[in-house]
Image: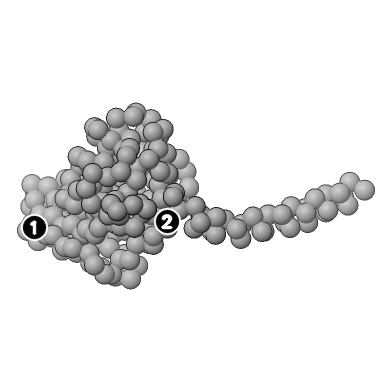
Amino acid sequence: MIRNIRNFLSKYHEQILDPHLVETLPVLLKGGNLLHIPTNTRWTQSVAGSGTTVQEIQRIATWTGTTASSSALLRCDLGGFVLASSFWLLDWDKKIYLVFNYVREALDTEAVARFQIKETNTEGALGAKGIGIRSDNFALMGESYGTALGVVNLATTIPVGQSYQIVIIHYPASKIEWYVNGILKGTQPTSANIPSGKAGGVSCVVNSIINGVTGGVNVGSSIFQPKIWQEM
């Protein structure tokens, strides 16, 4: 009898679980805006020194080249997330997911790479509302900005040329979480470091990298299959 009960519960679990999984995507789409960010069109390039960029159907990549203090940046504007006249914005009072796969290529202790969504379109640490990651050589850090910059050590060293999934979850007025390959690696609970309100200017996606004063190594930073979801 016990075996029969177990078999029944197992079949019942499958019957109630499968529809739940099927409905997950429709519920997300109904409750928010999902953007699978195109990687091979409409990106603006900015390079200095020997920096270069790559746009392909699966990734956007920035490379420093070997020249000292060279840099590369790819940026694009975000729009349509806010149901208002100011549609070129993100609403930081809503829950936001930023999901992508990340690869760092070539060893250089001076090179710093970043991937961010933010109110500005320039290279560098967050100085306006935004969230993202920073790669110091192969050490991952989480960055966020509300009214001040916050940095969280994600205690993760990425081997050269290996792909890692990064998930950043922004909980309005509460916290920001960073996941690496499905494991929670860092949390930002400080209110000054959590963006809130609608963005003050055009919201942007920025992939950037900058070399150090020594140079000599061509360092790459690749973002694969980037996606953003913001609740309505």
**Image x and y of residue 44, in percent:** 18, 63
Q: Residues within 10 Å of mark 1 (few under 14, many from 20)?
A: some
**Mark 2, residues whose alpha carbon is within 10 Å: few (<14), some, or many (≥20)?**
some
Task: Name the residue rendered at 33%, 66% in the picture.
Answer: 38
SS type, badge 2: strand
Q: Which quarter of the figure has residue 205?
A: bottom left
Q: Are marks 2 and 1 in contact (CB under 8 Å)?
A: no
Badge 1 marks a residue whose secondary structure is strand
Q: Quadrant of residue 219?
A: bottom left
**Can residue 161 be spotted in the picture?**
no
Tag on residue 135?
none
Q: Which residue is mark 1?
A: 48
**Foreground residue, 89 or 140?**
89
- Residue at left 32%, top 39%? 197
Q: Which mark is residue 33?
A: 2
Residue sitting at x 10%, y 54% = 70
